[in-house]
Image (cartoon, rainbow, N blue to C red):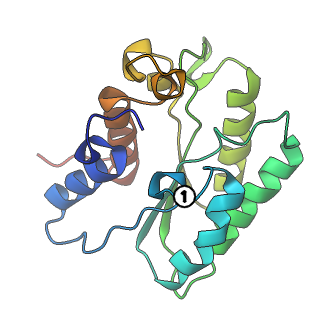
Amino acid sequence: MASSSLDKDYVHLLQAMIQAKEPGSVTDLRISGRFARLGTGTIEDLTKDATGLATAGPDLVTIQTGENDNFDKIAKEEFAARYRALVDALLSGPKRPVIVCTGVWGPGGKLDPADPTRYAGGAGRDKDDMIQAICKEKGLIFVPVAPFASLPANSGWGEDPGVKWHPNDAGMQGYADAIFAALYPVSVK
């Protein structure tokens, strides 16, 4: 939403990074949810498309959601149940994809001094903890985004508060870099 162009969003940046690492490996790219203009960006909306995506047999799926599921409208337990249902739907296909789940974007959130990869508290911390627990339970990769979401330089632009809230080009690059590092933890030069 706040990237300067489509090729600067984290999905396309990550695609280019994987393609550079493994030429010819990315043959299809599918974007679901609000980013694809299919809904509100809630877990419930993403789950509607997950079974179809799983049936397509993807090799890699990234899940970036949770920001639009507000605890004043959804109980914490329901958030966790919906996230688990989303993961289960993605795992229901003919083959098991590599699934990377990112933490939630919380611009300007304070980091935990004891663990600077985590928010100090609040809904961001609660959601990240739930997502990370589900990843551990299901054997998925969890990638925290709190370290770069907390930096004001990584959030949007302009006057619209909704756009300003989202990751800008630098924030999108942070997502792509963090996911890529989780997928390819050892760099061969």
Q: In which quarter of the image is residue 167?
A: top left
Q: In which quarter of the image is residue 173?
A: top left
Question: Considering only vertical position in the picture, is 49 above or below 163?
Answer: below
Q: Which residue does the image show at 30% across and 31% down from the upper left? A: 169
Total residue callouts? 1
Question: Considering only vertical position in the picture, is 122 above or below 87?
Answer: above
Question: Considering only vertical position in the picture, is 97 above or below 128?
Answer: below
In-front residue for pair 146/187? 146
Q: Which residue does the image show at 28% across and 47% down from the upper left? A: 6
In-front residue for pair 55/39? 39
User: Can you name the residue that lies furthest to the front here?
Assistant: 159
* Residue 142 visible, this orientation: yes
Residue underneath mark 1: 33
Badge 1 amino acid: Gly
* Residue 138 visible, this orientation: no
Where residue 32 appears, as percent x and y from the top left, is 50, 62
Q: Which residue does the image show at 74% across and 28% down from the upper left? A: 123
Asked whether, in this view, residue 1 is left or right of residue 122, the answer is left
Question: Considering only vertical position in the picture, is 16 above or below 55?
Answer: above
Q: Residues within 10 Å of mark 1 (few under 14, many from 20)?
A: many
Mark 1 residue element: loop
Where residue 128 appears, as percent x and y from the top left, is 66, 37
In-front residue for pair 35/122? 35
